[in-house]
Amino acid sequence: MFEGLHKFASPPHFHAISRWLSPTLYGVSLLLFALGLVGGLVLAPADYQQGDSFRIIYIHVPSAWLSMFVYMVMAGAGACGLIWKMKMGDIVARAAAPLGASFTFLALVTGSLWGKPMWGAWWVWDARLTSELILLFLYLGYIALQAAIEDRRVAARTGAVLAIVGVVNIPIIHYSVEWWSTLHQGPTVTKFDQPSIATSMLIPLLTMTLAFKAFFIAALLVRTRCEILEFEQHTSWVRELVRAEAAR
Amino acid sequence: MSAAAHGTALDAARAVLGRDLSRAWRRRAEILQPLVFFAITVYLFPLAIGPAEQTLRTLLPAIVWVAVLLSMTLTLPDVFAADHADGSLDLLALSPQPLALLVLTKALAHWLVGAAPLLVLAAAMCAVFGVDAYTLRALMLGLVLGSPVLSLIGALGSALTVGLRGGTLLLALITLPMYIPVLIFGTSAARNASLGLPVEAEMYLLSGLSVLALTLTPWATAAALRARLG
């Protein structure tokens, strides 16, 4: 098993594996999307209070979960690159950041779209919204830092330090924001504290979550592949690959 | 290499602190710049809000906090920029002394030069604007406990962006989100104080953040410097 892991961590093998793995995962995610969307938009009953508006959770909740998950992937991969000098760690961290930022943005936008009919406002200074927005800023800072440093090795290691510091910081920021919003909040009840969610609503939600996750991994693999080719453009295996592609 | 030949780690820290302070002292005019910036920022708010004294007095602690945050952010590149330009940063990184201690010292120097004068000015301005004594005390205690965190996280940001073009803006982009907890607890202490409520909880939280930053950020800053210098 470790042999396999070791191979996966070397750029040429990763490139070869991801070439068939990412289309497969795209297919899986497409199937799950179809199932989840039909389940969520057609089969699931309307909420007794929110009507059909609640259906946005099938996009909102998976992207909000992924927004945090991707940050952990980014920091974890960055740490692998920083500590064990794994080149693939550097590359994956760099490839994951824009995806994470996009999911965060998607979660904010869908939340805002849902908030307008439900709370009567596009934006409410709620703890979750605020810390999600700060998460977006953390992503943007990471991406800006990566973009500012030309040497990719240096950029990766510097970014990894920032991402790891972010992991320590995110809970502190989250709880301080929560504390802040409970101090002077009143107009809306925003906690998603429903005692339970009906099974007919839950199954499409879980399906959508899996679909999002499969999509994320597939997109991450494609992005990583592009990064590998750029990173390794002067190596012999990339040159041979390009020659083979050109001959075909 | 024996430790005796190089002195102890504390000697090195003392030397770094003395060097930073004397360099700041030789460029005294530059110490004034963030102070003037701070004063202008604070004075911009009454101009923007209008001369409603009661509103201003309620908002003033928050304005002071934000102005302190921004003024300190402006001076952050100085933590490592000069040392990077003349190459002494590489020597610090190569020295046998623990780098974490040296960067902690540099953050301390930044606090002494970039934050301490600001706090004095902030206290004077709040007194002039008529903030009551209890609120002023809570605001100042919050600033004293919270500003070390700003210097320490700022030193980390400064290390991450050292030597980059457009570094100041990038530095602000990276550090300001991390300043949010300090801002929240600091301003809520002042707000509670202005309502006559106790502020111990916020002070404990700010002290906690300070201790956490004091123990964790020097290592991260040292790692960031090592990553940047390659």
Image (cartoon, rainbow, N blue to C red):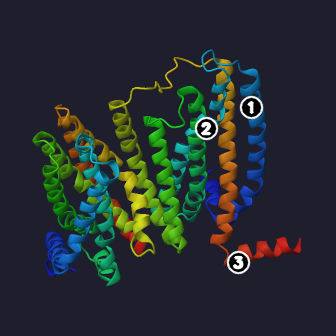
A115 w.r.t. B130: above or below: above
Between the C-alphas of marks 2 and 3, the distance is 46 Å
Q: Mark 1 or mark 2, which has the lower sequence index? A: 1
Between the C-alphas of marks 3 and 1, the distance is 45 Å
Q: Which residue is under mark 1? A: A37
Q: Which residue is under mark 2? A: A110
Residue type highlighted by circle 3: Ser
Q: Which residue is under mark 3? A: A236
Q: Depth check: B201 or B209 in front?
A: B201
Outermost residue toward the front in this view: B51
Q: Mark 3 or mark 1, which has the lower sequence index? A: 1
Task: Identify the residue at horizontal 43%, vertical 26% (top origin).
Answer: A187
Quarter occupied by the N terminus of chain B: bottom left
Q: Secondary structure at mark 3?
A: helix
Q: Is residue B14 visible?
A: yes
Q: Label 3: chain?
A: A
Q: Quadrant of residue A204?
A: top right
Residue type highlighted by circle 1: Leu
Discs 2 and 3 share one subunit: yes
Q: Residue B119, percent across and down?
A: 17, 57
Outermost residue toward the bottom in this view: B86
B174 w.r.t. B230: above or below: above
Tell us which disc is closer to us: 2 or 3.
Answer: 2
Between the C-alphas of marks 1 and 2, the distance is 16 Å
Q: Quadrant of residue A116?
A: top right
Q: Depth check: B196 or B215 in front?
A: B196
Tell us which disc is closer to us: 1 or 2.
Answer: 2
Q: Depth check: A121 or B218 in front?
A: A121
**Crowdedness of circle 1 by 10 Å Cα count: few (<14), some, many (20+)?**
many
Q: Label 2: chain?
A: A
Outermost residue toward the top in this view: A48
